[in-house]
Image: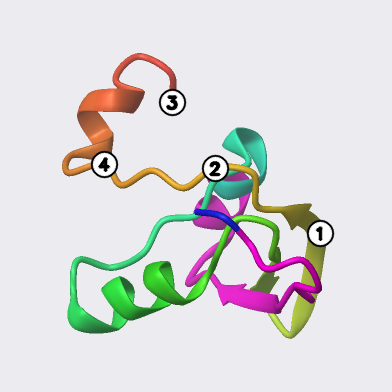
Amino acid sequence: MKKKKNYLPNYFLISVSNKKNLELCIKYAMAGFTNSINGFWTFSDIDIGDYVSFLYGARVKNLYRVIKKVAYKMLKNFLHGRL
């Protein structure tokens, strides 16, 4: 996706439900979204060049610049043997 010349990035907090999910997000530097309309809209709203952080337990962890967007249908198949 081509950005406008004066594009100002957005900053997003991605809330994770438990510490294991937070650790997985940090380990693989990727975020997972629910297979729902809310997950779809969140994925759609975040653009390449934006910044995201993970929110867990009222604390914000790390800051990542989005350099690539990929949707996996069955992430468990992708991560098989890596967890």
Give amino acid for label 4: Tyr
Circle number at residue 68: 2
Instruction: Please name the residue that numbered disc 4 is placed on.
Output: 72
Q: First in sequence, mark 3 or 1: give its number.
A: 1
State the CA–CA distance, disc 3 to disc 4: 16 Å
As shown in the figure, which amino acid type bears the numbered disc 2?
Answer: Lys
- Please state the horizontal and vertical placement of residue 38, each as a whole percent of the image: 29, 83
Q: Nearer the viewer, mark 1 or mark 2?
A: 2
Residue placed under numbered mark 3 in the picture: 83
Amino acid tagged 1: Leu
Residue 42 occupies quadrant: bottom left
Which mark's residue is nearer the viewer, 2 or 4?
2
Quadrant (top left/top right/bottom left/bottom right) for the C terminus = top left
Foreground: 26 or 19?
26
Query: Dot 1 corresponds to which residue?
Result: 63
Give the magenta range.
3-24
Q: CA distance from mark 1 to mark 2?
A: 15 Å
* Picture residue at 18% right of the left edge, 39% below the top: 74
How crowded pointer 1 is (Cα within 10 Å; few <14, some 14-19, many 20+) is rated as: few
Which of the marked residues, 3 or 4, is nearer the chain's N terminus?
4
Residue 43 against residue 42 in the figure, above or below: above
Residue 62 location (% of width, % of height): 82, 58
Determine whether, in the image, residue 8 is placed left or right of residue 45: right
Q: Residue furthest front?
A: 5
Circle 4 packing at 10 Å, graded few (<14), some (14-19), many (20+), is: few
Mark 1 vs 2, N-terminal side: 1
